[in-house]
Image (tube, rainbow, N blue to C red):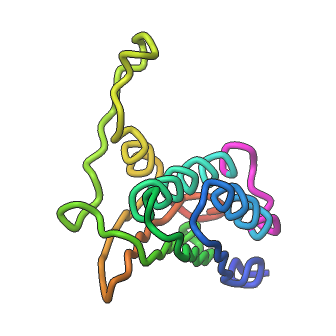
Protein backbone atom coordinates (compact mmCIF):
# COMPACT_ATOMS: atom_id res chain seq x y z
CA UNK A 1 0.00 0.00 0.00
CA UNK A 2 1.42 3.43 -0.92
CA UNK A 3 1.21 6.43 1.36
CA UNK A 4 -1.28 8.08 -0.97
CA UNK A 5 -3.54 5.01 -0.54
CA UNK A 6 -3.44 5.12 3.27
CA UNK A 7 -4.89 8.58 3.65
CA UNK A 8 -6.73 10.45 0.94
CA UNK A 9 -6.64 14.26 1.22
CA UNK A 10 -9.37 15.61 3.46
CA UNK A 11 -10.80 18.87 4.73
CA UNK A 12 -12.03 20.10 8.11
CA UNK A 13 -14.25 23.21 8.16
CA UNK A 14 -15.51 25.16 11.19
CA UNK A 15 -16.79 28.63 12.10
CA UNK A 16 -14.30 30.51 14.27
CA UNK A 17 -14.70 30.18 18.04
CA UNK A 18 -12.80 28.63 20.93
CA UNK A 19 -15.15 25.63 20.81
CA UNK A 20 -14.52 25.34 17.07
CA UNK A 21 -10.79 24.98 17.72
CA UNK A 22 -11.43 21.89 19.84
CA UNK A 23 -13.90 20.55 17.26
CA UNK A 24 -11.41 21.08 14.42
CA UNK A 25 -8.55 19.46 16.34
CA UNK A 26 -10.65 16.39 17.11
CA UNK A 27 -11.83 16.10 13.49
CA UNK A 28 -8.27 16.51 12.21
CA UNK A 29 -6.85 13.86 14.55
CA UNK A 30 -9.77 11.52 13.76
CA UNK A 31 -9.05 12.01 10.04
CA UNK A 32 -5.40 11.12 10.64
CA UNK A 33 -6.27 7.87 12.48
CA UNK A 34 -5.40 5.62 9.48
CA UNK A 35 -1.78 6.80 9.77
CA UNK A 36 -1.51 5.38 13.30
CA UNK A 37 0.60 8.31 14.50
CA UNK A 38 2.53 7.70 17.69
CA UNK A 39 1.92 9.88 20.76
CA UNK A 40 4.75 12.29 19.90
CA UNK A 41 3.60 12.74 16.30
CA UNK A 42 -0.06 13.28 17.19
CA UNK A 43 1.06 15.68 19.92
CA UNK A 44 3.06 17.68 17.37
CA UNK A 45 0.07 17.89 15.03
CA UNK A 46 -2.24 18.91 17.86
CA UNK A 47 0.15 21.53 19.29
CA UNK A 48 0.96 23.21 15.97
CA UNK A 49 -2.65 23.22 14.81
CA UNK A 50 -3.94 24.45 18.19
CA UNK A 51 -1.50 27.38 18.04
CA UNK A 52 -2.44 28.22 14.44
CA UNK A 53 -6.20 27.93 15.04
CA UNK A 54 -6.13 29.87 18.31
CA UNK A 55 -4.22 32.65 16.54
CA UNK A 56 -6.92 32.78 13.86
CA UNK A 57 -9.72 32.95 16.42
CA UNK A 58 -7.92 35.59 18.48
CA UNK A 59 -6.44 37.79 15.73
CA UNK A 60 -8.12 37.13 12.38
CA UNK A 61 -11.61 37.07 13.92
CA UNK A 62 -11.11 39.05 17.16
CA UNK A 63 -13.86 39.53 19.72
CA UNK A 64 -16.35 42.00 18.33
CA UNK A 65 -15.89 40.87 14.71
CA UNK A 66 -18.27 38.40 13.13
CA UNK A 67 -17.26 34.75 13.24
CA UNK A 68 -16.02 33.38 9.96
CA UNK A 69 -14.95 30.18 8.26
CA UNK A 70 -11.74 28.31 8.97
CA UNK A 71 -10.88 25.57 6.50
CA UNK A 72 -8.08 23.05 6.98
CA UNK A 73 -6.87 20.99 4.05
CA UNK A 74 -4.69 18.00 4.89
CA UNK A 75 -2.70 15.87 2.47
CA UNK A 76 -0.30 13.06 3.39
CA UNK A 77 2.87 12.51 1.36
CA UNK A 78 6.20 10.71 1.82
CA UNK A 79 7.66 13.77 3.53
CA UNK A 80 4.81 14.15 6.03
CA UNK A 81 1.55 16.03 6.38
CA UNK A 82 0.95 19.05 4.19
CA UNK A 83 -1.54 21.38 5.82
CA UNK A 84 -3.21 24.51 4.51
CA UNK A 85 -5.31 26.63 6.85
CA UNK A 86 -7.53 29.25 5.23
CA UNK A 87 -9.65 31.99 6.79
CA UNK A 88 -11.33 35.22 5.66
CA UNK A 89 -10.43 37.25 8.73
CA UNK A 90 -8.05 40.15 9.24
CA UNK A 91 -4.65 39.95 7.55
CA UNK A 92 -1.45 39.38 9.49
CA UNK A 93 0.38 42.58 10.39
CA UNK A 94 2.85 43.56 7.65
CA UNK A 95 1.56 40.67 5.54
CA UNK A 96 3.77 38.08 7.19
CA UNK A 97 3.86 35.70 10.13
CA UNK A 98 5.34 37.05 13.37
CA UNK A 99 8.98 36.17 13.96
CA UNK A 100 8.24 34.19 17.12
CA UNK A 101 10.94 33.90 19.73
CA UNK A 102 11.86 31.49 22.45
CA UNK A 103 11.03 32.82 25.89
CA UNK A 104 12.54 32.25 29.30
CA UNK A 105 9.96 30.10 31.03
CA UNK A 106 11.97 30.00 34.26
CA UNK A 107 10.19 33.11 35.58
CA UNK A 108 7.13 33.80 37.69
CA UNK A 109 3.83 33.41 35.83
CA UNK A 110 3.06 37.14 36.04
CA UNK A 111 6.45 37.88 34.41
CA UNK A 112 5.87 35.64 31.38
CA UNK A 113 5.95 37.69 28.16
CA UNK A 114 2.71 37.92 26.18
CA UNK A 115 2.65 36.82 22.57
CA UNK A 116 5.02 35.36 20.02
CA UNK A 117 5.79 32.04 21.70
CA UNK A 118 3.09 30.23 19.71
CA UNK A 119 4.74 31.30 16.47
CA UNK A 120 8.08 30.11 17.83
CA UNK A 121 6.52 26.67 18.42
CA UNK A 122 4.90 26.58 14.97
CA UNK A 123 8.12 27.55 13.20
CA UNK A 124 10.20 25.20 15.34
CA UNK A 125 7.98 22.15 14.78
CA UNK A 126 6.73 22.76 11.22
CA UNK A 127 8.68 22.84 7.98
CA UNK A 128 8.24 25.20 5.03
CA UNK A 129 5.93 27.63 6.86
CA UNK A 130 4.39 30.07 4.35
CA UNK A 131 1.72 32.75 4.65
CA UNK A 132 -0.11 34.46 1.81
CA UNK A 133 -2.95 36.96 1.68
CA UNK A 134 -4.92 36.73 -1.54
CA UNK A 135 -8.43 37.92 -2.43
CA UNK A 136 -9.35 38.72 1.19
CA UNK A 137 -8.18 35.28 2.25
CA UNK A 138 -5.40 34.28 4.67
CA UNK A 139 -3.56 31.10 3.69
CA UNK A 140 -1.11 29.47 6.09
CA UNK A 141 0.71 26.48 4.62
CA UNK A 142 3.21 24.18 6.28
CA UNK A 143 4.46 20.63 6.48
CA UNK A 144 4.74 18.46 9.59
CA UNK A 145 7.38 15.75 9.33
CA UNK A 146 5.18 13.02 10.82
CA UNK A 147 4.13 9.65 9.37
CA UNK A 148 7.24 9.66 7.17
CA UNK A 149 8.14 5.99 7.59
CA UNK A 150 10.77 4.99 5.08
CA UNK A 151 11.72 8.53 4.02
CA UNK A 152 13.75 11.44 5.30
CA UNK A 153 11.91 14.36 6.89
Residue sticking out furthest to the left? 94
Q: Is residue 53 above or below residue 78?
A: above
Q: Quadrant of residue 89?
A: bottom left
Q: Which residues are magenta?
A: 32-41
Q: Looking at this view, is 40 or 13 the one in front?
A: 13
- Residue 36: x, y in percent? 80, 59
- Residue 45: x, y in percent? 61, 54
- Residue 15: x, y in percent? 61, 72
Residue sticking out furthest to the front? 64
In the displayed structure image, the side of residue 19 where residue 62 appears, left or right: left
Q: Residue at x 77, y 78 (%)?
A: 6
Q: Quadrant of residue 101?
A: top left
Q: Residue at x 30, y 44 (%)?
A: 100
- Residue 142: x, y in percent? 44, 66
Q: Residue at x 64, y 64 (%)?
A: 150
Residue sticking out furthest to the bottom? 135
Q: Is residue 55 above or below residue 92?
A: above
In the displayed structure image, the side of residue 11 where residue 91 appears, left or right: left
Amino acid sequence: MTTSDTLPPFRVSVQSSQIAVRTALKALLDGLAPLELDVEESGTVELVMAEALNNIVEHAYPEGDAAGPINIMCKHAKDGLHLKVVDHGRAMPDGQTPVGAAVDVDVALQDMPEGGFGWFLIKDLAKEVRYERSDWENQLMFRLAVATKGSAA
